């Protein structure tokens, strides 16, 4: 059975915009675009959505503590 993006949004309890975002990311398995409409297959009554990534890791985690703690030597005024 196939449903539209609006029907899939109602089934999943999310907005149609979120469904369109998942479709554009290719995360809804088996979804096809015909013309300007999406058809989404149902598996056990729900669309199958793949998990996404959590984004890039923060850059501050990759620097070691010794690199961030540098000392500056000042010349003596003697």
Image (cartoon, rainbow, N blue to C red):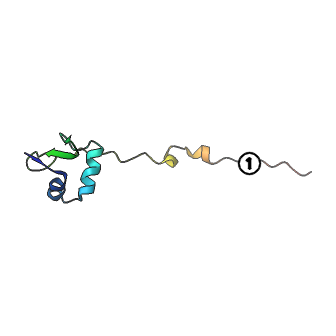
Q: Nearer the viewer, residue 15 or 4?
A: 4
Q: Is residue 60 something that shows in the picture?
A: yes
Please give the residue where the numbered disc 1 appears in the rendered image.
Answer: 72
x, y percentage for residue 24?
29, 45
Residue at horizontal 44 percent and vertical 46 percent from the top: 57
Relative to 32, is 17 on the left or the right?
right
x, y percentage for residue 33?
21, 42
User: Which residue in the rendered view is the most extreme toward the front?
Assistant: 35
> To which quarter of the image does residue 15 belong?
bottom left
Relative to 59, is 45 on the left or the right?
left
Q: Is residue 48 something that shows in the picture?
A: no
Categorize mark 1 by other alpha carbons within 10 Å: few (<14), some (14-19), many (20+). Answer: few
Residue at horizontal 84 percent and vertical 48 percent from the top: 75
Residue at horizontal 61 percent and vertical 43 percent from the top: 67
x, y percentage for residue 49?
21, 46
**How many numbered marks, from 0 up?**
1
User: In which quadrant will I find the N terminus?
Assistant: top left
> To which quarter of the image does residue 18 belong?
bottom left
Residue at horizontal 25 percent and vertical 43 percent from the top: 27
Q: Of helix, strand and loop, which one carries label 1?
A: loop
Relative to 50, is 4 on the left or the right?
left
Relative to 31, is 57 on the left or the right?
right
């Amino acid at each position: 059975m196939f449903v539209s993006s609006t029907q899939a949004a109602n089934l999943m309890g999310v907005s149609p915009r979120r469904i369109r975002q998942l479709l554009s990311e290719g995360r809804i398995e088996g979804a096809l675009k015909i013309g300007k409409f999406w058809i989404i297959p149902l598996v056990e009554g729900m669309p199958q959505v793949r998990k996404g990534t959590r984004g890039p890791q923060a850059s501050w985690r990759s620097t070691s503590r010794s690199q961030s703690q540098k000392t500056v030597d000042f010349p003596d005024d003697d």
